[in-house]
Amino acid sequence: MEMGVGGTGNSPLGRVAMRPAAAGALAGLVLLTGCNTIPQLTAVVTGGAAGAATANPAVGFAVGVATDAAANFVVRYYGRTRQGAEQDVIAQLAGALPVGDEASWKIHHFIPLGDEHGELRVVNVIDSPLATCRRVIFSVDEGKAPKLKQAWYATDICKDAKAWKWAAAEPAVARWGFLQ
């Protein structure tokens, strides 16, 4: 069996493995379809490759299901990490403001897709024997003036021993997704 670029046509995976255009097309497809389809596309590719390499569709199916589960975990973990960073930025900024004041907020993620920004206002303080909390309203801004669109949301933040933290546990608005 020949190895290298010219000899890759001799094995089931060799044809695909040595085609940069196919890899580029797959990467472009992932970018066009978005993060929600990455686990499924990864599962189809790995399951198909495993099934072709072993000539056993059951192995391909098992590898595809396992890959889908692992890729879903990674995508959700990444979303939760971004969500936590965005919530922390808003909570720390709002915790430092006096009641009635407002400020601008923004986040710069390591991967700069979906960097959010907007305004926030501290509405009131909620004191209890358990914690000191604040009611905060904040916007998520899209676009720039004169076509600026602001969507406003409300949440509570509470101070723990070290810092202000996001107190809301359930999503209030489907659009806000990961942040609430």
Image (spheres, rainbow, N blue to C red):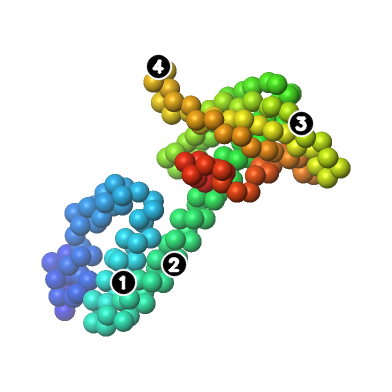
For image coordinates 68% across by 27% down, the residue present is 122
Residue type beneath disc 4:
Pro
Q: How far is disc 2 from disc 4 in space, using C-alphas?
A: 44 Å
- Percent position (x, y) of residue 167? 68, 44
In the drawing, what numbered circle is on residue 146? 4
- Note whether 41 is above or below 30 in the view shown: below
Residue type beneath disc 1:
Gly
Q: Are marks 4 and 3 in contact (CB under 8 Å)?
A: no
Q: Along the line of sight, which residue is nearer the eye, 113 or 99?
A: 99
For image coordinates 61% across by 27% down, the residue present is 120
Q: Is any atom of residue 153 visible in this view?
A: yes
> Which quadrant of the figure has residue 152?
top right
Q: How far is disc 2 from disc 1 in space, using C-alphas?
A: 12 Å
Residue under pointer 1: 47
| N-terminal label among 1 and 4 | 1
| N-terminal label among 3 and 2 | 2
| Label 2 Cα neighbours within 10 Å, binned few <14 / some 14-19 / many ≥20 | some
Q: Along the line of sight, which residue is nearer the eye, 93 or 17?
A: 93
| N-terminal label among 4 and 3 | 3
Residue under pointer 2: 69
Residue type beneath disc 3:
Val
| N-terminal label among 2 and 1 | 1
Residue under pointer 3: 125
Q: How far is disc 4 from disc 3 in space, using C-alphas?
A: 34 Å
| N-terminal label among 2 and 4 | 2
| Label 4 Cα neighbours within 10 Å, binned few <14 / some 14-19 / many ≥20 | few
Mark 1: secondary structure: helix
